[in-house]
Structures are given as C-alpha cells and as structure tokens.
Image (cartoon, coloured by chain):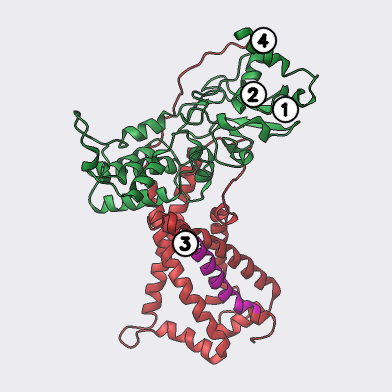
Chain colours: A red, B green
C-alpha cells in the first residue's frame, strides 16, 4: 500500500518570549547556592560542639541568639542570618522551578529511548534531590530548632533534643538519607556554579570536580558524625 | 571497466572463499515515522536481513529505503549530505544516544557510525532530535534553522571587504588560536541539543561565541555578540544549561564544556559593561 505524504516546511509554535535570560537564572542559582554553602560550613563546625559536652553545646546555641548584645537587641544577628538564608532558599527554588519548566517546554515530547552517556547520578538527581532536601530542611527546623517535631518537645534544651532525636534509629536514618542527597547535590552544584560564574576551564575542570567531591564528603562527613555518635552511644 | 568492477564485487560475495562468505546481520529497526509536522508520529518496526558490518549506519537505512520503495511504501526521510562526518547534516538518536554515541565507543557522526558496532540480531531504536526548537519536518528529519538564527544574531565579525591584510600584521598567541580552532570545529549538527536533558543549545552557542571571542578580529563585537546570541537562544525556546555534560560527550567534534564557562564569563562581563540584547 502506497502512503502518499506531502512534505511541509517545519511548523514552529511561537516560543514564549523568555522574560529572563536562562543564564541569569543560573547565576541566581549559583549565588544563592554559595550563600547556603557558606552557612552549611558554619553549621557543620558549630555542630561539632556537641563533642565538648552538654554545657558547651547549649552555651553555643545561646551565643548564636545573643551575638552583638548589648549593642543590638537579642536575636538581631540570628534574624538577619535567617532572612538572608530564606531569601537564598526562595531565589534558589525560583531559579530551579523556572529552569525546570523551561526544560519541559523545550522538549515537551520526550524520547522513546534515551540513555545517559556522561551524566553523573548527582547531576541526574539535582531536581528531585533538591525537593527532598528542601522538605527535609522543613522537618529539621520543626525537629531540632523549634522542637515541635522532637520527642523532647519545644521546652527542652538543644542538646537534649539532639540526643533524644538521634537515639531513634528511624530519625537518624532520615537524617542520613537527606544528608547523602545533600552531599550529591553539592557535588554537582559546586561544579555547576563554577561553570555558571565562568570560572572553569579545561585546565581547572579536574581540580574543580575533585574539590567539589572532597568538599562534599568532608562537609557531609562532619554532619554525619553527630547522629552516628549519638546512635552508637558516644554522645549522650 | 565498469563491468570488471561489478564482476569483482559480485565475486566477493560467493561462498567459494570462506573468508569472503557473506556474513550479513539481521536487525530489527524501530523507527520514528511521522508523516508531517502536524502528525503525532509513532515507532514502526522493520526487519532487515543480510546487512554488511562494513556499511555505514546511513547505508543501512538506504538499504531499508530501497526495500520500502520496491514494496511501494514511503521511504524513511533522514537528513544527510557529505557522509564524511564534516557537514553536520546527519543526526539521529540511535538507541537513546545522539549519533549512536553509546554504541560507537568514541565521538562520531551518524554517517561515520558503522554497522560493525552492532551485533547480529540487535534491535535498534532510531528517533529524530527532539526539541521544540527543532520541529520535525518528516520522520527523522528536523528543522534546525534555529541554530542558523543564533549565528545570525551575532556569530560573525564585521570586516571591511577588499584585499586581505598581511597575515602577520595581527599576531595571535598559539594557545588562543588552538582553543579558537577547537571551538570552530563545531559542525552545528545539533547533537548537543538532542543529548541535553534540558534540550539546551548552550554548547553550540558557546562554541560559536568562543571561536570568535578568542581571536583579535572578534574583539570589537565580543560583548554584543554574546548578549545577542544568548538572547536569541532563549527566544528560540531552547532549555537552560545545568552543566550535566551530555552535550560534550555526544559532540562528534568533542567540543569542551570549558566553552560554556567562557560564554558565561563573557556574558557576565558584557552585562556589567552595559551591553544589552537588541530586540
């Protein structure tokens, strides 16, 4: 049976005019990511205070809330840090959703068969991994910062909340999974931010990737020390 | 003359010489058939027998098309021109990788991929490049003029015509000329877009920005070039780059990811210097 078809010129659907440059979105992503990474470094080092004992850890927690006193009212510095972080999270999320939707528009009908050649597991899990890490942060704040989701409740000291939480293997498992995902997110994120800000080249490529890997492993390793120490009874 | 050659080619297929015995492959092809831009399209299965491992991928499709024509069917439309891996016309998604990069073992174009890379009895999925900026014309042929429009928006230098200036009057450091040449090897096949999970044309645009941005002749328009080319790329409806690296891996010319970093660097510098895209 002969199938007669007529070849027509490619019909383009008029693309939605890009309101913001895709590269601008990436820069927002990179800069907000860097702000959050700087916070994570301080957060991880602060956590290690737990090994100095209950008084030291609770005292550190109190200090964060009173930095700058009496020149500024209590919680001023902490509130500023929180506002900056919240802005960074919102910017990061906006850029991600915007690029995600742009990618969806750019290929509305996917391939029947598509196989990765070069992409790393880390780069493949950036979007959903990011969503999971975001949800984890909400839980983490309810758990250890506010205490409402913690077995010890909001009236307890930070040290007690930490020990009570991580004594439960299920809670520790949630933290471990989220932190490993965060580590992979950072591994690709650091490399990607270097590219986006135009600071990579063929010579630096290897170093940047190695740094991203080592940095992520050290940072996440530092975070993981605390829950594992509680779980195995070294702290508590 | 012709008769002798034909005779020789027939002799090579006889079973008298075991080394020259036919060792054709049997293949199952699942090919994307789409009658036109408005058609929805579907995968259609074809059986092919006695395919020589020495054939190129496109020659294998030629064999299929000959059979389809003889059977009174519509042949499969695909783009091709030089068949030497230099023009950038051909480009197919083969078993889920651009130009069959997952099968080839190294950078290649579809025309330079040979059937010896496949095994007898293989099933091969063949699809067109998929991106809304690359609308399907028919079957495996897509309209890649979006890439031409990106070039038109800034991938050139403005130079007075007339006698060519003395070559030695403008010195270019070897390092820069090498990097510019590496970027200039881009053949605009679109494999980067096809392979990118975001359908981004960043590697293509970056190669074009780099190859002019690294040489003295490209300097006067360097800022406007990068700003306009990125704006045009967004206007065409390509996705955004997330530095995954599928593009560079699929690139038949091995264009490096460093070009994307250079584009970003140039773009940020240009925006700081006040360059804005012309609308």
Chain ID at mark 4 = B
Chain ID at mark 3 = A
Disc 2 designates what residue? B60
Disc 1 designates what residue? B27
Chain ID at mark 2 = B
- Position of B167 relative to B270 (above/below): above
Q: Which mark is residue B85?
A: none
Q: Which mark is residue B70?
A: 4
Please name whichever residue, A203 or A144, is drawn nearer the observer in this view of the structure. Answer: A203
Circles 3 and 4, Cβ within 8 Å, touching? The answer is no
Q: Choose the circle earlier in sequence order: 2 or 4.
A: 2
Magenta span: A209-228
Quadrant placement of the N terminus of chain B: top right
Q: CA distance from mark 2 to mark 4?
A: 16 Å
Residue A120, percent from left and from top: 58, 54
Chain ID at mark 1 = B
Magenta residue check for A177: no
Please name whichever residue, B166 or B230, is drawn nearer the observer in this view of the structure. Answer: B166
SS label for mark 3: helix
Disc 3 designates what residue? A208
Q: Are marks 2 and 3 on the same chain?
A: no
- Position of A16 relative to B141 (above/below): below
Residue A41, percent from left and from top: 47, 74
Circles 1 and 3, Cβ within 8 Å, touching? The answer is no
Magenta residue check for A210: yes
**From the viewer's perspective, is the residue at label 2 or at label 3 nearer?**
2
Does the rendering let one see residue B85? Answer: yes
Quadrant position of residue B73: top right
Name the chief secondary structure element in magenta.
Answer: helix
SS label for mark 2: helix
Q: CA distance from mark 2 to mark 3?
A: 43 Å
């Amino acid at each position: 049976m002969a199938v007669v078809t007529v070849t027509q010129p490619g019909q383009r659907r008029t693309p939605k005019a890009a309101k913001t440059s895709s590269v601008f979105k990436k820069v927002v992503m990179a800069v907000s990511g860097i702000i959050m990474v700087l916070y994570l470094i301080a957060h991880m080092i602060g956590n290690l205070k737990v090994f100095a004992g209950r008084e030291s850890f609770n005292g550190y927690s109190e200090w964060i809330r009173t930095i700058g006193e009496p020149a500024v009212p209590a919680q001023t510095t902490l509130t500023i840090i929180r506002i900056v972080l919240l802005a960074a999270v919102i910017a990061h999320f906006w850029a991600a959703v915007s690029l995600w939707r742009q990618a969806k528009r750019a290929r509305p009908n996917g391939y029947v068969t598509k196989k990765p050649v070069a992409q790393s597991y880390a780069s493949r899990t950036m979007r959903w991994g990011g969503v999971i890490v975001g949800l984890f942060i909400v839980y983490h704040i309810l758990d250890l910062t506010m205490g409402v989701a913690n077995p010890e409740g909001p009236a307890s000291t930070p040290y007690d909340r930490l020990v009570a939480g991580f004594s439960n293997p299920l809670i520790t498992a949630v933290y471990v999974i989220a932190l490993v995902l965060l580590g992979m997110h950072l591994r690709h994120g650091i490399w990607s931010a270097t590219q986006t800000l135009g600071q990579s080249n063929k010579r630096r490529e290897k170093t940047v990737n190695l740094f991203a890997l080592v940095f992520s492993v050290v940072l996440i390793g530092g975070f993981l020390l605390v829950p594992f120490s509680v779980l195995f009874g070294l702290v508590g | 003359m012709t008769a002798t050659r034909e005779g020789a080619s027939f002799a090579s297929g006889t079973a008298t010489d075991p080394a020259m015995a036919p060792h054709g492959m049997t293949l199952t092809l699942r090919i994307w058939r789409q009658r036109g831009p408005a058609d929805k399209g579907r995968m259609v299965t074809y059986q092919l027998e006695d395919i020589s491992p020495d054939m190129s991928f496109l020659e294998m499709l030629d064999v299929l098309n000959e059979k389809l024509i003889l059977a009174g069917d519509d042949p499969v439309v695909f783009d091709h021109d030089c068949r030497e891996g230099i023009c950038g016309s051909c480009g197919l998604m083969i078993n889920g990788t651009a130009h069959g990069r997952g099968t080839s073992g190294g950078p290649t174009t579809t025309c330079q991929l040979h059937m010896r890379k496949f095994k007898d009895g293989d099933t091969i999925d063949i699809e067109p490049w998929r991106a809304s900026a690359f609308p399907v014309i028919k079957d495996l042929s897509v309209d890649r003029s979006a890439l031409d429009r990106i070039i038109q928006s800034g991938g050139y230098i403005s130079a007075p015509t007339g006698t060519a200036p003395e070559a030695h009057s403008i010195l270019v450091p070897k390092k820069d000329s090498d990097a510019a040449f590496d970027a200039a090897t881009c053949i605009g096949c679109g494999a980067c877009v096809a392979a990118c999970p975001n359908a981004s044309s960043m590697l293509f645009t970056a190669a074009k920005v780099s190859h002019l941005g690294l040489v003295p002749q490209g300097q006067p328009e360097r800022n406007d070039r990068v700003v306009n080319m990125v704006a045009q790329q967004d206007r065409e409806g390509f996705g955004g780059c997330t530095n995954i690296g599928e593009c560079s891996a699929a690139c038949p010319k091995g264009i490096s990811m460093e070009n994307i970093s250079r584009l970003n660097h140039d773009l940020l510098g240009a925006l700081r210097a006040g360059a804005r895209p012309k609308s």
